[in-house]
Image: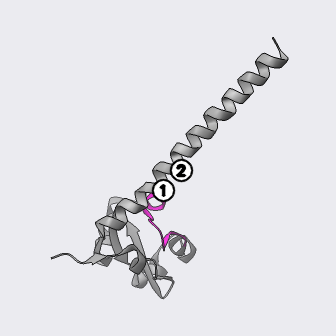
Amino acid sequence: MQNIISFAEAAKHTKEDDLWLIINKKVYDITKFVDQHPGGVDTLTGAAGKDGTDDFNSVGHSDSAKKEMEKYYIGELDPNDAEKLKAPLRTSAGNTTTIAIVVALIALCAYLIFFP
């Protein structure tokens, strides 16, 4: 049976000497790897306490780096927490799109009023 870890529990481990990361709904205790990471400690602590999937994927880690991570796997993120982590992303994207449309409409109205 796999170990289920809540987001709240994973988020407690954000220090160099006690560091967990959430990547693709999996939780890793990378405390023993911190000093070996080519990107440095700050990169890792910056991804801790949140869903670090985007941070991890944006770097373009090699297959060997992904395989190395499996040594530090300690469990799965609680599925309920995983769904909660997705929700703000959808809301944020929706708000950004709405704001962009409103700004475009205001600009169009201003153009039509001042340059008939």
Cα–Cα gap, marks 1 and 2: 6 Å
Whether tag 1 and tag 2 are in contact, CB under 8 A, the answer is yes
Q: Which residue is mark 2?
A: 92
- What residue is drawn where x is 72% and y is 29%? 106
Q: How far across and down, in percent of the image, does residue 80 sit?
A: 32, 65
Query: Going by the picture, which residue comes out furthest to the top?
Result: 116
Quadrant location, the N terminus: bottom left
Magenta segment: does it hold 49?
A: yes
62 lies left or right of 2? right
- What residue is drawn where x is 44% and y is 61%? 56
Specify the amino acid type for callout 2: Ser
Where on the picture, by quarter, is residue 73?
bottom left
Quadrant location, the C terminus: top right
Q: How far across and down, in percent of the image, does residue 97 sit?
A: 56, 39
Q: How far across and down, in percent of the image, does residue 52 sit?
A: 45, 65
Q: Which mark is residue 88?
A: 1
Q: Main secondary structure of the magenta part?
A: helix
Q: Which residues are magenta?
A: 46-58
Tell me the SS state at disc 1: helix
Q: Is residue 65 visible?
A: no
Magenta segment: does it hold 41?
A: no
- What residue is drawn where x is 30% and y is 70%? 78
On screen, residue 30 above or below 99: below
Specify the amino acid type for callout 1: Pro
Instruction: Decide: few, some or many residues near mark 1? Use Cα within 10 Å; few <14, some 14-19, many ≥20.
Output: few
State the scheme by which the image is colored.
Answer: one colour
